[in-house]
Image (cartoon, rainbow, N blue to C red):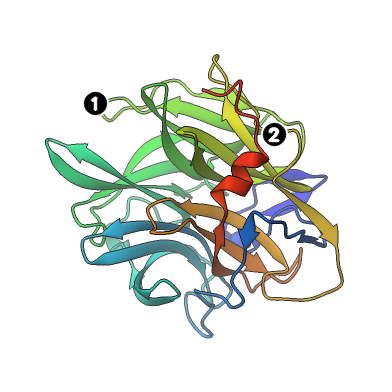
Amino acid sequence: MYYSKGRIILASAVFVAVAGLGYAWQKNLLQGDVFDWGREPLIRTQPASEESLHVEYPTVYNVSDGTAMLYSAYGDDHRWRIKLALAQTATDYVKQGNIFDENKLPFKGGYAFPFVRNTRVDGATVFELYFSAVEDGEPTYSAIYRATSADGLHWDVPKKLMSDKALDPLVIKQNGREIILYTSTLDGENVIQSAELKADGSVGPVHTVFNPHSGLYTLGVVHVDNKPVLVVETEHNWEALCFNTSGDLISASQEPIFNFKETTEKAWDGLKYGMYFFEGAATPTLYYNGIEAHGAEQGGQIGVGSYDPDSLASRLNLAQCQ
């Protein structure tokens, strides 16, 4: 995706290589007392491969033998794919390759932005994967697909869940309901959309729950006082949102939990985006994307750091949150 005037422009699949560079706009994240970043990438690009340009958007979860990560990769053939990595240690993941037999996929375009959750079906634990896909004949992401797995490693052929220009989906429980959230555009404006996931596997009506009238991109979720707090990457910062009694997203803090600052310093993660709070870890862990600068056409990689729940909570005001 390319960015213009602080808004998401949904580009063709050929040009999706720069997806997720974020809205930092030649700025660097101002480190505070909430986050502590990794010094080196955890998942790196790999020359002359399907992962040569970007590896981004991790989702991390526990499996029977340890910890697994799904991530998006963009390489020499200019197509996004979702791949698997398994943890040997907290800072050492081994790549396992593609998660799907691509000859069996119901679409030929790229697919990215994985989100995995555990659920119970007929008394058994089931892993569910949600992701964005470019369907045949569409110029950009046009649908969310869902796949299931018994072990979190081997995935069934995905099925279409819903049609929309949907990016970065995630699923949470809110007021006793399971809902899917994602970023999109509506009448040229950035929005966060929401829909209920029903027990029969269908999706309820789509509602716009946040319209900031400015640029936004990636989403993350972290629970504070048992309430879901949505972390949203905007043009200038990371903001915290929560649900009010009407089911809309409102500000959960008077100030952003991250601000960007001007810098000429270059680092592999000069820009940080694509946040994923791994709440199943033994200690509070944050996976994220890093790239050198806005406009860089390659080099997005995945890092891992930590966050301080108490410091994060001290910056929030959850009085109106459900």
Which label number is shown at residue 83?
A: none
- Asked if residue 212 is positioned above or below residue 94 in the image, the reply reads above
- Asked if residue 7 is positioned above or below residue 54 in the image, the reply reads above
Measuring from the top left, give residue 63's x and y in whole percent: 26, 59
Mark toward the start of the polypeptide (2 vs 1): 1
Measuring from the top left, give residue 57's x and y in whole percent: 52, 58
Measuring from the top left, give residue 294's x and y in whole percent: 76, 63
| Crowd class of label 1 (few under 14; some 14 to 19; many from 20; radius 10 Å) | few
Q: Residue at x 76, y 65 (%)?
A: 295
- Asked if residue 108 is positioned above or below residue 46 in the image, the reply reads above
Measuring from the top left, give residue 256's x and y in whole percent: 73, 42
**Looking at this rendering, what residue extends furthest in the top direction?**
246
Which label number is shown at residue 200?
A: 1
Question: For the N terminus, which image quadrant?
Answer: bottom right
- In the shown orientation, is residue 58 left or right of residue 249? left
Q: Amino acid at mark 1?
A: Asp
Tell me the distance, in whole angstroms, between the alpha carbons under discs 2 and 1.
Answer: 36 Å
Q: Amino acid at mark 2?
A: Ser
Q: Residue at x 65, y 36 (%)?
A: 316
Q: Residue at x 53, y 73 (%)?
A: 75
Residue 142 appears in the picture as rendered = no
User: How many dots with numbers?
Assistant: 2
**Looking at this rendering, what residue extends furthest in the bottom direction?**
48
- In the shown orientation, is residue 83 left or right of residue 167? left
Q: Judging from the image, what secondary structure is the residue with disc 1 in?
A: loop
Mark 2 or 1, closer to the camera:
2
Q: Judging from the image, what secondary structure is the residue with disc 2 in?
A: loop
Q: Which residue is mark 2?
A: 253
